[in-house]
Amino acid sequence: MVEHMKWWGWGRESVSFSHGDKPDLAPFVRTHIGLDITRPPAQPPAFADLAIPAPTLPEPLRAALVAAVGAEHVHTDAHDRVVHAYGKSLRDLVRIRNADLGRLPDAVVYPDGEQAVRAVLAAALDADAVVIPFGGGTNISGSLEAPRDETRPVLSVDLGRLDRVLEIDADARLARIQAGALGPHLEEQLNAQGWTLGHFPDSFSHSTLGGWIATRSSGMQSDKYGDIAEITRAVRVVTPAGILATRPVPSQSTGPSVREMILGSEGRLGIITEATVQVHRVAEERVILGYFFPTWDDALVALRQIAESEASPTVTRVSDANETRFSFATRKKGSLATGLVSAGLKQYLRRVRNYDLDQMCLSFIGFEGTPAHVKAQRKIVGEIVGRHGGICVGTGPGQLYDQKKFDTPYIRDFLLGQGAVADVSETSASWSQLAPLYRGVVARANKAFAEIGVDGWIMCHLSHSYHSGACLYFTFAYESPATLAAIEGYDTVKSAIQQGFLDLAGTLSHHHAVGLEHASWLGDDISPAGVHLLSVLFDGIDPGHNLNPGKIIPGAGAGAGAGAGGSAKDGGLTGDGGSAADGEYTAG
Amino acid sequence: MVEHMKWWGWGRESVSFSHGDKPDLAPFVRTHIGLDITRPPAQPPAFADLAIPAPTLPEPLRAALVAAVGAEHVHTDAHDRVVHAYGKSLRDLVRIRNADLGRLPDAVVYPDGEQAVRAVLAAALDADAVVIPFGGGTNISGSLEAPRDETRPVLSVDLGRLDRVLEIDADARLARIQAGALGPHLEEQLNAQGWTLGHFPDSFSHSTLGGWIATRSSGMQSDKYGDIAEITRAVRVVTPAGILATRPVPSQSTGPSVREMILGSEGRLGIITEATVQVHRVAEERVILGYFFPTWDDALVALRQIAESEASPTVTRVSDANETRFSFATRKKGSLATGLVSAGLKQYLRRVRNYDLDQMCLSFIGFEGTPAHVKAQRKIVGEIVGRHGGICVGTGPGQLYDQKKFDTPYIRDFLLGQGAVADVSETSASWSQLAPLYRGVVARANKAFAEIGVDGWIMCHLSHSYHSGACLYFTFAYESPATLAAIEGYDTVKSAIQQGFLDLAGTLSHHHAVGLEHASWLGDDISPAGVHLLSVLFDGIDPGHNLNPGKIIPGAGAGAGAGAGGSAKDGGLTGDGGSAADGEYTAG
């Protein structure tokens, strides 16, 4: 039995965010966005009140699916269809709270292996059905829904039964793992033999290996373990042209990398069934230290210098002043974090270190390895932090962060219930662009808040460091009823932030994929000719647009790729579109 | 003025390999392949004796090229056409020595920037000409020649005038560099400001940034600096659909990576004009240490453990016993390397360490960074080496290796002149597969030598280490006249080795690309469905097959991609080819 998240929100039925044990939170929220979170929350609709259209599953397709996976694994019940209707974007949460279910899948199919996936895809293509692969359902970019006006049968292919670690090669430090394995489940299986994948996205508890690959995911310890693109050494994918299987070799020079084409493909090239991934021995010592910096600018320079140094931390994270203050506001009574901002420490920072407490920034930097290695890393990092006015505040805050890191997504549901919209948007940029990008994005968000007439809040953290730059992860919130009409205001704010990324040398997404949410910016990011490359790839592999249509590049039906084709024409070499005219190389 | 290598062989006119200063080499070669290298060498043909067909360059095309780059940069002279006819594969060297020039380009064009490249490509597509981008001309996989039966005009587009480092962003540690910059020239420009790219393939002296990207190159210090695929953070490419430009962001989740599609594309998607690459401050200390291991198996285990350790060397290289003996045989009289195998050391190794001197393996491991960092790395590596019976022999051998590392390619010309065929073949595999792959490939090569009736020699080194595996680089040689007929025997040996790679869990190439030489194995490596992905990409971008046709995937003319299409059909999901039938989504 495959477990799913709440049909109406994030995570387990039994878990939710609450403010009761966080005495500073309600005043903080009231001050900054004018919202009273102590009011009784609005409840999500009752499932029984949803208007659920009957599925339209042509009998030959149903029979073929039953033949492929067995009758008990072809679900057409209302609950399963609703669970698979959307991911968990803010837009998804608002729509489902308003019983706007979009184009529900007609059936949810649970294959148990590659052959079953192959049979499902063959049946779907034979019947001209739409196929949407589904991992844990955590996607926040609109990658999991069918086009609202889709007239063909829609199948959600849930990979949840493909949940096993198949093999660990200890010498090669590679594991073969099925695509549907959830984070905690695959880590358990690896940990049992002393290994870890080291991939811990915020969505970890409810997302899968296949989903990480299909969206080019990044995790909290990717500084050390690499993004999923590095971790994934080989893939097996059921495509319309058969099984795509690459070899788990460490590096190769065999034309454009087809492994890399699967990474980020969001179901448009096929269904990922398995991957061979790098694993590591569980580290002997693991520590996450808290640091304070006097200002965000100091912190950015320090983190850049850490990236340039010979240290190789597992986690490099720093919150801006707003997010730091939010962290303080969410500390629990009597928790480890209380010490973090004890009166004594405050006084020391203000009087001795000349900190402006409203500007200071909380940072977490993690280290793993042998005690000697950890010690050497800490020393290098400590010196750099010190040079920029920072101080170490020990392991307490880091432990707390480490324990609570996967709970953040519950907050959006809590706030929606209280009458506020909150969401995230992330990008990456080179070190030299980070500070202006940050300032510009904050300014644009504030302008957008003013435009829609709200007291908005925006905060940010640097979440991953690389040789040449870092990821900036923004969170914003403002008071708003969770109605469908609220989506317009949300779009104004979200668009202002995204456009800021693109105007200020960032990327449209560092690790949240394209889906529908970001598709309109893709050409600004990878250029129209880049979109054209993707377009010919998708159209070539899937001329009927049966594979998760409309994601990454919005298509206008089979053989279209209209946006991209148009761009290619506009940007074509000859100006008259002679050599690159739309439609010349996409067949209908 | 763009400088070129010898039209008939590797490198500068003034440089060649000789045995005179290496007293042990002639006896060594005589013993192992029965060849007397002290005989006067056969000379390459005189240029004047070559039969060079007149170019066929339609007047409108010539006029358009002149308009694009200026008359002085459209070359149709015999020498320039011959220089651009081939790369420097063994097959190329044999053919050119036998005045077999293949399908010469009709013109060589030297654009000086992106706009000129764009105009050249537009002119070529308008005239239905073939376009082959040319960097330094070092390719050994057949990536630079036109199909022998090509009836359309053929243009070699030489990027040699695009040779500048345009910009260095010190904070982001990124440099924008033109694609035609040769290794030494770009390093000079970077070094002048205290930076290095850290990319040093064997071909370094004569290869270009664009060529490295187009073939997914790897260098001698890639353990630290990364393969070119990691180093390259953004590309600018002139494609038929306009300028493809990606952003130099450190990581992104924007669909399948178009940057990665350009890496390894060998001119099939367009012409790379510029890249933004990671650069590093020149290291404070740099040392390459020599080590001996008692056996190859000991060495492989030690190098795996080094990869697993917390050390991060810049170079990890170990030669098998045969290559170690070859190294000894090529030492110069009175050189630093003499001490390497002094009588005293030999005696110590044999008597005290119980080495069988015929089995021992020479290793080079490099370290860079601050003195403290280098010291810590050396300590970790030294302990691992010691556990496997290895000993450190100091910096002498490493210095020698470092000085001579780019001279190796000259040996093939020398041997051809003396009547022997010598070539290389490299692969990568996971750590657990390396030992059986090595044994199997050596056995197959020896079987192939027997088959063609020669005393062959094969030797190998591990050249790069990764988390999950390593690159094995084989060199083989045997006595053979350098006639066209000799190619058949060469193909027997080379094919046996390549087939060994594929049968024994390796890849067809770690860093030498696909070109024509490896194309027939591509489906075995990345699966027929993988080839199909590449096929739809190439056909979609270049329906007329004007861009370096036939490389990576042999095509049967416009709209074909016959091999791949066929595979996709065979391997298709439905069996009847209904959803993935050949030709359905490629337009003619």
Image: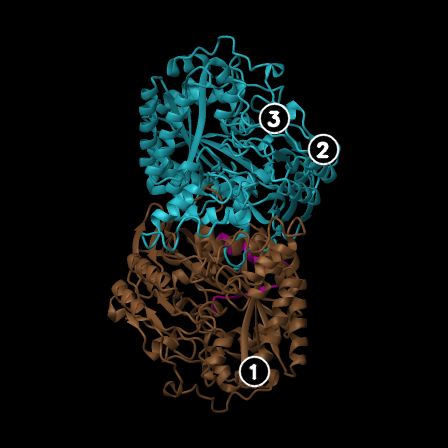
Chain colours: A cyan, B brown
- How much space separates mark 2 and mark 1, taking CA atoms? 61 Å
Determine the chain carrying the residue at label 2.
Answer: A
Q: List x then y, in percent, for residue B226.
A: 47, 54
Label 2: element kind:
helix
B315 magenta-colored: no
B440 or A310: which is nearer to us?
A: B440
Q: List x then y, in percent, for residue B119.
A: 30, 59
The residue to which callout 2 is attached is A73
Above or below for B192 versus A169 = below
> Dominant secondary structure of the magenta stretch?
helix
B378 magenta-colored: yes
Q: List x then y, in percent, for residue A536.
A: 48, 49
Under mark 2, the amino acid is His
The residue to which callout 3 is attached is A83
Under mark 1, the amino acid is Ala
Q: Which badge, 2 or 3, comes first in the chain's sequence?
A: 2
The residue to which callout 1 is attached is B486
